[in-house]
Amino acid sequence: MINMNNLNARNLIGNRVRQARHKTKPKVTQTDLLARLAVRGIELEKTTISKIEAKTRPVTDIELVAIADALGVSVLWLLNIE
């Protein structure tokens, strides 16, 4: 479930992005994910995925949908609701 106690976090999906990248065979690197997002029209800086995973960068709704699609998971799963 969503932990509302961590008010310093800038997004809710950081841990799940890392988990989804690592559970695939072979693992999806941060660079792989950036390329998958670029194909979907989302151009991000090289360090953005690590910042998202560290919860120091907010994620837009469009990025959320693209990240879920690129990792083959649902938006609800990324948000830890499912």
Image (spheres, rainbow, N blue to C red):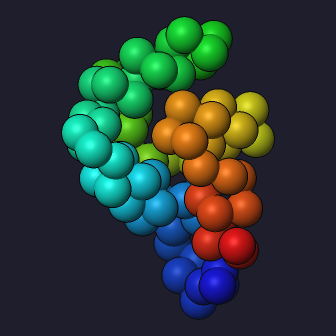
- Number of marks drawn: 0
Residue at left offset 40%, top offset 29%:
33
| 20, 9: nearer the viewer | 20
Q: Is residue 53 visible?
A: no
Residue that lies at the very extreme toward the bottom in this rendered image = 5
Instruction: Specify whether 45 is left or right of 75.
Output: left
| Residue drawn at (30%, 37%) of the image | 28
Res 19 → quadrant: bottom left
Task: Judge from the rendering whether residue 43 lies leftward or rightward of residue 25; answer left or right.
Answer: right
Residue 65's place in the image compared with 75, above or below, is: above
Left or right: 10 with respect to 77?
left
* Residue for point 47% across, 20% down: 36
Q: 1 or 53: nearer the eye?
A: 1
- In the image, what residue occupies the spot 54% across and 10% down? 39
Q: Is residue 34 above or below residue 9?
A: above
Q: Quadrant of the N terminus?
A: bottom right
Relative vertical location of residue 18 with respect to residue 33 in this rendering, above or below: below
Rendering coords of residue 46 (x, y %): 31, 22
Height in image: 38 above or below 51? above
Q: Position of residue 27 (x, y in %)?
A: 25, 42
Is any part of residue 17 visible from this angle?
A: yes
What is the x, y in percent for residue 72?
Answer: 56, 42
Percent of width and height locating residue 45: 39, 21
